[in-house]
Amino acid sequence: MSPNVSNISEIAFACEKAGADAITAINTVQGMIINIDAKRPVLSYKRGGMSGPAVKPVAIRSVYDIYEKVSIPIIGVGGIMNGRDAIEMMQAGASAVGIGSAVYYYGVEVFQKILNEIKEWMEKNNYDSVKEIIGLAHDGN
Ligand SMILES: Cc1cc2nc3c(=O)[nH]c(=O)nc-3n(C[C@H](O)[C@H](O)[C@H](O)COP(=O)(O)O)c2cc1C
């Protein structure tokens, strides 16, 4: 789902009602860079999609809001660079996470590294299954 909307959770709810099996959130956040000497946007399409650490708070908030509105699983994506980010996304309500930009920064080894960091955090905090982490940041959990 695109985060470039005014109420992402309403749209997620409509998707669920229409028969969606799961929600993936978020896609990139629209942005623009202007070259002040050229006095024009840098990108030929003018607007571009932002990803990586800068968009993580938007992704976390979106997943948190969607989790409060739907009961289908959510795949949380946006700015996950390490195990702590993945756990934050799961506590917001994601059943699984997606990783894009971190591969650009760290290579494909990042998947195993993030998995190890998730396991380490779970062991330290006495969790046996990731299922116990999903939605933990919500009131009442
Ligand atoms: C180079 C690049 C290409 C992407 N292409 C697509 C695409 O074709 N379809 C799509 O839904 N999202 C696409 N995305 C968005 C990613 O799936 C993801 O939602 C976004 O990058 C945020 O996650 P990240 O911070 O882990 O990269 C693309 C992102 C990047 C950086």
Image (cartoon, helix red, strand yellow):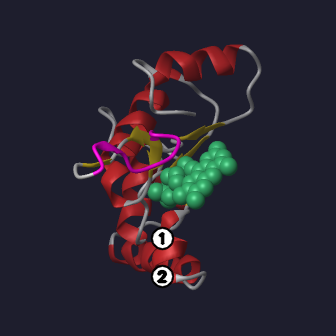
The residue at 53%/33% (across/down) is 2
Q: Mark 2 points at which residue?
A: 106
Q: Main secondary structure of the magenta part?
A: loop
User: Would you say the beta carbon of the disc 1 residue lies within 8 angstroms of ligand 1?
Assistant: yes
Q: Does 7 appear above or below 104? A: above
The residue at 69%/14% (across/down) is 17
Residue 20: % across, % down: 73, 27
Q: Does 80 appear above or below 119? A: above
Left or right for 113, reference 92: right
Q: Does 5 appear above or below 29? A: above
Give the image quarter of residue 15: top right
Residue 95 in view here: no
Viewer-closest of 110 and 121: 110
Magenta highlight range? 38-47
Residue 75: % across, % down: 59, 46
Q: Does 44 appear above or below 99? A: above
Quadrant where the C terminus is found in the figure: top left
Q: Residue 102 carries which label?
A: 1
Is residue 50 within the magenta segment?
Answer: no
Quadrant where the N terminus is found in the figure: top right
Viewer-closest of 78 and 74: 78
Left or right for 72, reference 138: right
- Disc 1 is placed on an element classified as helix
Give the image quarter of residue 112: bottom right
- Disc 2 is placed on an element classified as helix
Distance CA(mark 2)–CA(mark 1): 6 Å
- Residues at discs 2 and 1 in contact (Cβ within 8 Å): yes
The residue at 41%/59% (across/down) is 52
